[in-house]
Image (cartoon, helix red, strand yellow):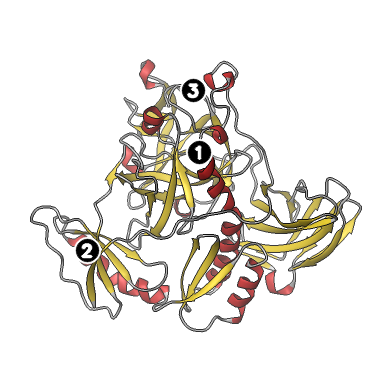
Amino acid sequence: MTSIRKAIASTAIAGALVGATALAGPTSAYAESDQPGAAGAAASILDIIPAPTLDRMVAQAPLVDAANVIRTAVDRAPARGYAGIGLVDDHVTLWWKGALPTDITAAVTDARRTAPVQVAKATYSQAELRKAAAALTPVVKANPADASHSVRLRTDGTGIDIGVDYTAGAKLPKLPATGVRTSFVERDRLVERSRANDAAPFDGGASIGVTMPWCTAGFGVRNVDTDAGYLLTAEHCGAIGSPWHVGLSTGTGTLVGYAVDSNDDHDTMIISTSTPGDHLYVGGQQDEVRAKVLRWTEVFPGQLLCQSGHTSAGEIGGPVCNLRVDFHYDDIEDLVEATQLDGDEAARGGDSGGPVYSVNADGTVLAAGTTTRSLGVGFGFQDFATARDDYGNIVPATTIASTCRVSFVVTNSWVTGYSASVTVYNDGPAANGWSLGFAFPGGQLVQGHWNGIFQQTGAAVTVTNENHNASIPTGGAVNFGFTANGSPAVPAPFTLNGTTCN
């Protein structure tokens, strides 16, 4: 049941969805007034990323919202027919083995109010694939000299891929029978990838090191429960207890803090600091072009991302974008693998630990993970959700620390009104029962609604849950929508159970 094949590139996102997308929260990126960005070269990330690439990334925002709504429903009872979920062209695809349960059917219906969703048949469920992978992984990892190096579950549920690198004398391992179709796929092993003079508050994308600048800062983060501040980066960059500095090119540099925790398997590390920054560098090595980190995001196959490693910034003067997520590993590392679609180098030595992110239409960014390794167009990173599993309830150190976030999407508009989809993300403890409040900015009145109980007094609107969507687990999302008269506009602020959301 094992076959050998070449890796085939999956379909990338193309085109744009109807309607405008906006995220509630702080707006644009900025450049310091005495830096090149302020002189008209590049004032924000919107000036740096090629327009076609940026358009495709922004168009994915509703797809990510829809995928998260479905993922939340799947996670409530995972041991069923679920195989995978991904972004394909202009829609979301859910792969499922067997008939959809009632709750998943309802979640797909909800998600389709935000973006197109297709349901496709899967040969194996994710539970079946993971059981098989558990038997395969020890064999694949047993001998580093063997050609095999990674175990990947196919998102579409058609089987398992074993990544192999046919170096001189390397042999294929003898795999145990699992009852699941398994293929050897030729893929080079990715190599670990270990800004010039940052100062507090310490931002992502800056060059960092212990005695010399050998890695890149990922994101400034805070633990919501303790308010402790950290800088997130890659574990292979240094040891716990080591002192980390920025500005090492000027001498000993400025102390950021000490590495206090790490996860070797996941290649993540946190450096303690009282002043984590809420921006990241997106320009060249010697400028101050930065973008606001608004929140974090789950990542899905087909999603397009950027990385802002320090070395790549020096080579190309900006971020590496058009990184398409291909799949999550299913081994002890739990990494995510992507491909640079333009044939460019995905990352360079010194980019390790740097920020991986998606870009919003207003120039803000969403934290997606940290760079770990690469080779040519191949790219490996650790997703932010896994870092949260490693270090507790950490979130980007935004100006407004919050346990909730809201995505607001105008799905249609006409002369006298519009329709909108609202996705609420919960970064705090599980909520059983919720109430979201917001205010319209221009006298709009709700005309119709779904998936919530609406009350409006003047500009103020309160939406409470219905019975079927009362719970929002930690890291989960719920969705509701409405039609209103007047011109489309983003309400603000959003509050979930009294807490102001990002």
Asked whether residue 238 is in view, the answer is: no
Asked whether residue 288 is in view, the answer is: yes
The picture quadrant where one finds residue 44 is: top right
Label whose residue precedes the other's in the sequence (2 or 3):
2
Residue 352 position in % (x across, y down): 36, 39
C-alpha distance separating marks 1 and 2: 40 Å
Residue at disc 1, secondary structure: loop
Give the residue pinned by disc 3.
Answer: 287
The reply, left or right, for residue 120 in relation to residue 346 is right
Residue 187 position in % (x across, y down): 25, 56
300 or 206: nearer the eye?
A: 300
Amino acid, disc 3: Asp
Q: Which mark is residue 438?
A: none
The reply, left or right, for residue 328 in relation to residue 447 is left
Residue at disc 3, secondary structure: loop
Instruction: Name the residue at 58% across, 75% down.
Output: 104
Give the residue pinned by disc 2.
Answer: 140
Which residue is at the far left?
169
The picture quadrant where one finds residue 469 is: bottom right
Q: Nearer the viewer, mark 2 or mark 3?
A: 3
Q: Residues within 10 Å of mark 2 (few under 14, many from 20)?
A: many
C-alpha distance separating marks 3 and 1: 19 Å
Residue 231 position in % (x across, y down): 47, 37
Residue at disc 2, secondary structure: helix
Give the residue pinned by disc 1.
Answer: 50
Amino acid, disc 1: Pro
C-alpha distance separating marks 2 and 3: 44 Å
Q: Residues within 10 Å of mark 3 (few under 14, many from 20)?
A: many
Q: Residues within 10 Å of mark 1 (few under 14, many from 20)?
A: few
Amino acid, disc 2: Val
